[in-house]
Amino acid sequence: MSKVPEKHRVLFIDSTHPLLFEILCDAGLECDYRPEITAGSVKNTIHLYDGIIIRSKFALDREVLANASRLKFIGRVGSGLENIDLEYAKSRNISCFNSPEGHCRATGEHAAGMLLALLNNICKANNEVKSGQWFREVNRGVELHGKTVGIIGYGHTGKSFARCLSGFGATIIAYDKYKTGYTDEYATESEIDDLFCNCDILSINVPLTGETKYLVDNAFLQKFKKDIYLVNIARGKIINTSDLVANLKSGKVRGAALDVLEYEKSSFEELHRTDLPDDYLFLLEHQRVILTPHIAGWTHESNKRLAKVLARKILGYLGLSGREITAGNQEVPQA
């Protein structure tokens, strides 16, 4: 008698849209949904699983992955992979999947919204009117039309942002160190020096790596020929906040729209509440700084789409079929 193959076992250690759990179970995987699990329990039980689903709550470092004797894949609900030791995972033949296609549309829209609010003083004016003040001249805005927008990192999110800006009459140029031939109807492939020479607005759309940590510091900002507006919806530690504050004070940075801060906890769910530095307090009080709590891409639609994108990648890797994976009436973007 032939032996019945064991089911692939998958551990969810963070909260996700229930659709991901349902699709994987429907395809025959045995899934344990434990978003309340502790780091110690993950380390002690990971050897029982073929797959693990994460967001950002835990770091899957060498110490944890060393116990993952049967792990075949890690699925990241979202885009950033900085909480996974990718080199060690590769050495253990563990495949890692993320799902930037799932929330790139929402992230691009959020970045565009923050930029328009910044240029037109919308948040400041809203607060003034609600407090009984009616100031028009001091809230005169700046048009996006005719400006040059530079995008660093032209992946799913960078392209989505460019697409959202395509109807405003801006010139959009993009630099991506690891891609070539990516000029399209939304942006023109450029060198980093082109951005330094021409940008009025800079958008950061790169992952956090050893190479990009504090990429945007004083030396970097001083290379721009013009005073610029800065948008960051990527990761907080890509920008050196102290240097950003210094350049806001000098006027080199005319304003900043920040969905992410270097003071976030690793889970991105809250700030480090103790001993927040003066630079953070400066950002809170500056009228030309708009802050949101890491919610770019955090829409009801993207929540489902992230689940569907990741399910498609996992089932494809395992050679399994699942239910129709679409987002409403539109196909989920392909990788």
Image (cartoon, rainbow, N blue to C red):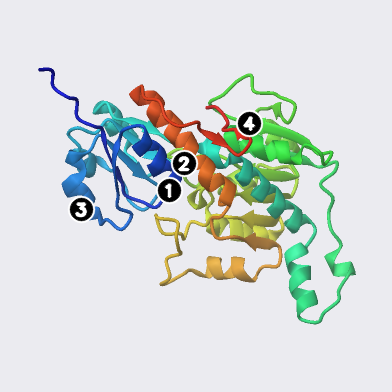
- Secondary structure under tag 4 reads strand
Q: What secondary structure is found at the residue carrying circle 1?
A: helix
Q: Hey, which quadrant is residue 269 in on the image?
A: bottom left
Residue 87 or 329: which is nearer the viewer?
Answer: 329
Mark 2 or mark 1: which is in front? 1
Q: Label 2, label 4: how many angstroms apart (C-alpha)?
A: 30 Å
Three-letter amino acid code at the position of disc 1: Pro
Viewer-proximal residue, 195 or 96? Answer: 96
Q: Which residue is the site of mark 2?
A: 307
Distance from Cα at disc 2 to Cα at disc 1: 8 Å
Question: Pointer 2 and pointer 1: residues touching (CB < 8 Å)?
Answer: yes
Q: Which residue is mark 3?
A: 41
Do the residues bearing badges 4 and 3 touch, measured as CB atoms within 8 Å? no
Q: Extreme left residue here?
A: 1
Q: Indicate the position of residue 235 as horizontal and vertical percent values.
A: 51, 48
Q: Earlier in the sequence, mark 1 or mark 3?
A: 1
Which residue matches tag 1? 18
Q: Earlier in the sequence, mark 1 or mark 4?
A: 1
User: Is 90 in front, or is 263?
Assistant: 90
First of labels 2, 1 by sequence position: 1
Report which residue position mark 4 lands on: 175
Q: Could you tell me residue 91's position as x and y percent? A: 26, 27
Task: Using residue 89 as the reference point, say whether residue 19 is left or right of it.
Answer: right
Which comes before the other along the chain, label 4 or label 3?
3
